[in-house]
Image (cartoon, rainbow, N blue to C red):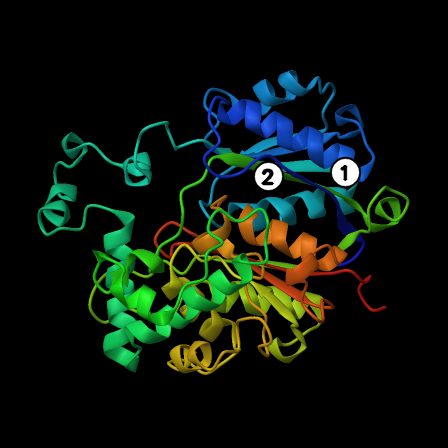
Amino acid sequence: MGDGTAIAGLGMTELGKVYGRSPRRLAADAVRLAAADAGLAPSDVDGLIVSHGLGGSPGIELADTLGMRDLRLLTQMNAFGATAGAMISYAAMSVRSGAASAVACVFADAPLKPRQSSGAAYHRDAREWYGFGGMTAALGLRSVNAFYALAAQRHMARYGTTSEQLGAIAVATREWATRNPLAQMRDPITLDDHQSSRWVAEPLHLLDCCLVSNGAIAVIVTSAERARDLARPPVHLWGWGQGHPGHRKERGSEWGLTTGAAASGATAMKMAGVTPADVTVCELYDCYTYTVLVSLEDYGFCAKGEGGAFAASGALGPGGSLPTNTGGGQLSAYYMWGMTPLSEAVIQARGDGGERQAPANDVILVSGNGGILDHHSTLIVSPHPKGA
């Protein structure tokens, strides 16, 4: 299956503190940009996959906005941060089967409001906490930050992972971001800056946590044969996989210690015919520094429990042995769910990275993490056709 399909177009709107446009309008702009990048018109696209969050009936309403008619594929998907990888795999299988010839996959969001803090973007009203859910809220578990802090704390307790090791991920990611003109945060940071940034939910500092961004990103998936004749170099899809472990947040479970990256990575790499040793660039879902660390372990780039030491070795940053999150990731560039790592993978595979271009882009691993370690997706992409 992992052969014969490619990403032919990438469309990115302005990202960050972008106001005045609804998610649907942003999504339409991104699809138009992706189609134009491929040398196509929106009417040349006969499939549309929309990530959730656009309101109403997002697929058909977005198609109408774009002037798309007679679509052969139209659906909405939601695996939270793992959605992008799932959308791409579904699009690739649809193209392979002949169900569609060119599929647009798009994510858009606009949680930021003028004169409102980033933290307020995802604030939940206290009245939402009731019944058994109110018991965890009473204990302080009222946000995604708190649950990921709990997961990071479990990893620390089991393996001796330290805050300084998480900080090494933040510093390396920011170093990449200083080379990315699209990044929201481009000022260098040090480990001391990380350690002195305020607590969000211990053991996570502010610099352990991702940004909040408005904007949209879309890609066009089509056959590799067709992509070769389009405007931009194709980014070939070698393999994909998903993992939904279902670990319960309770003592004795593997929650926080092993994630869906283990299953989805094994599936994607087997389909692609590669091993971790073949991967030259990683674009990992980094809603928190912790998710990078645990994903590196579960993908097999280091042994379980050694992610902290691996990150602290300098392997992830510019000049390191495994360039990771080369655009600055969600920690420093922009937060577009799984489209953040995917968009940077396309940029790297095309050789468009400029100052941040990785020295080798032959095999790029892309990860998505959704929910609170509930969902995971993995893609293996390359500028080369599979087997070439």
User: As displayed, is residue 9 above or below residue 262?
Assistant: above
Residue type at mark 1 is: Asp
Quadrant containing the N terminus is: bottom right
Where is residue 212 shown, x and y percent of the image?
A: 40, 42
x, y percent for residue 356: 64, 62
Q: Residue furthest right?
A: 229
Amino acid type, mark 2: Ile
The one of 152 and 335 positioned closer to us in this rendering = 335
- Image coords of residue 168 (percent x, y): 41, 72
Residue picked out by circle 2: 217
x and y percent of residue 97 in the render? 76, 44
Q: Quadrant of the C terminus?
A: bottom right
Residue at the spot 30% in from the left edge and 31% down from the top edge: 116
- Between the residue at mark 2 and the residue at mark 1, the CA separation in whole angstroms equals 12 Å
Element assignment for label 2: strand
Q: Is residue 132 left or right of residue 103?
A: left
The residue at the point 76 percent across, 50 percent down is 6
Q: Secondary structure at mark 1?
A: helix
Q: In the shown orientation, is residue 288 left or right of residue 351?
A: left
Label located before the other in sequence (2 or 1): 1
Answer with the quarter of the image where residue 119 lies.
top left
